[in-house]
Amino acid sequence: MKNQDRTPLLDVLLARAKRGVTSFHTPGHKNGQGIDKRLRSYTGRNAYKLDVTVFPEVDSLHDPVGPIKKAQALMADAYGVKYSQFLVNGSSCGNIAMLMSACHPGDSVIVSRNAHKSTLSGIIMSGVWPIWIQPKVDQHLDIIFDSDAAQVEQALHQFPEAKAVFVTSPTYHGVTTDLKKIADLCHTHGKLLIVDEAHGPHLKFHKDLPISAVEAGADMCVQSTHKILSALSQGSVLHVNSDLVDISRVRKILSILQTTSPNYLIMASMDAARRQVFFQGERIFSRLIRLANEARERMNKLERVYCFTQGEIRAKGYDLDVTKLTINVTRLGMSGLDVEDLLAKEYGIQVDCADLFNLIAIMGVGTTRQDVEKLLTAVEDLDRKEPGHEKNWVLQLPSLSTEMAMTPRDVFLQHRSKRVPLTRAAGHISAQTLTPYPPGIPVLIPGERITQEIVDFLKDLAEKDIRVSGQETEELRTIKVVATR
């Protein structure tokens, strides 16, 4: 175990800032001297002194030999993995890099359909064939679950040629799948397990949280250090945890994908966040777990609001990071989007995201009891108000295990497409991604054969005036398809 009390990158940046070094390097604000006065009057100047560029003293993210190399080694040691690399483009960059590192063009990958949209970017850039697993819809809780071990096992038997399995765990709702069982299945079949663990950088540091991907045996995973921990936005990390992964290839691909002008303040905040969670994680998350459980108990005493529990999720074969509060508001007679808007405008509260059914309130290392009390007071106030008209919305998905007639990469690169009326789209190959919210899962992917069931589903959404992300026009009347001639 390395000395986890060290923060080599943060230390170098702070020492340089205190020396008052005169800057003749980028960025142009020169240690904050040129920052707009209105901005500087609020932030002060000190943070800008840590915004430097690549030179020997502060090291290079693309060829680290000094403090960045040491900071990444400490990150790997803290998580118990073979190699960790800082990401300054967020976990989206990491998802793309994992697919490009694990696979070659023409390989196939088993992927749950509820993967983040950056996964499709990785599929396009790597040139792989995606083998989609249908997510599980729970109409009682109004959420969608990621693939379970039984679905992965079935896909492995059905598609033995697959190179890897790509899983998202936790989901936005904090639900985790049985990663240990999935990892064992993958390795029994000689496949890599790749995990988008963007919402789980904290799981390793408390015994009452679900098992983390690195502890479960994932070969690679990405984590958003900024989502729950104290790193600045865009700060994420890619972990390599297997001899089956070529670390030099991972580094080369990340060097292609990441900026040559990384923000050193972001990287320093990751260095500090690692030290903080290593030493204080048990205490911090004990407090957050206690606050979250108290919040659930109080909300579930209300008449028209509900927040599902860890016990309910475990009964379905999954687990739950309880620090994420999924607040079902359908009985208020409003959509989650409407309630999100009310909370922001009338109560000064911003949740992470919302859909027709739920709000998702994410707790992090900086969440206080006062914050939770403010949210509970607002929700209790809304619960007392006269409800709106009852909604008869139903969370549903069409069958998404359709034929992949072309790779998404080929569709993206060939630039030959046309628009056809939605009513006549069945049988064509999709040239666009269409994602309705809810459920926030693409019902069409470039390269897929469009089925009549998907056409009917999209027509129903259009009739309900539900906008579909990616539709490109005000009304969903046409679909972009591959032009065969």
Image (cartoon, rainbow, N blue to C red):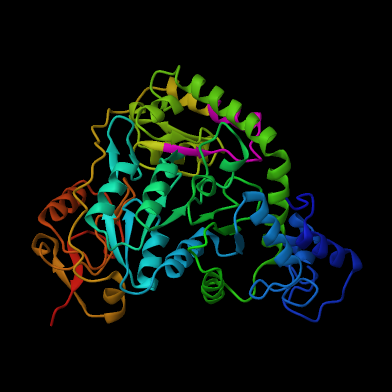
Residue 25 in the figure: left or right of residue 374: right
Magenta extent: 359-377
- Nearer the observer, 473 or 216: 216
Residue 33, given in percent of the width and then of the height, sits at 80, 70
In magenta segment, residue 365? yes
What is the tally of numbered marks visible in this picture?
A: 0
**Residue at the extreme front of the image, as rendered:** 188
- Nearer the observer, 189 or 270: 189
Residue 440, given in percent of the width and then of the height, sits at 34, 49
Compared with 123, 111 (above or below) is above
- Nearer the observer, 66 or 367: 66
Q: Residue at x 19, y 49 (%)?
A: 399
In magenta segment, residue 456? no
Q: Is residue 315 visible?
A: yes
Q: Residue at x 51, y 69 (%)?
A: 246
Quarter of the rendering containing residue 34? bottom right
Q: Which quadrant would the C terminus be assigned to in this image?
A: bottom left
Q: Residue at x 73, y 78 (%)?
A: 26
Residue 167, given in percent of the width and then of the height, sits at 40, 51
Residue 72 in the figure: left or right of residue 171: right
Compared with 261, 308 (above or below) is above
Q: Residue at x 48, y 67 (%)?
A: 97
Residue 193, given in percent of the width and then of the height, sits at 42, 55
- Nearer the observer, 349 or 319: 319
Residue 14 in the figure: left or right of residue 459: right
Q: Is residue 434 visible?
A: no
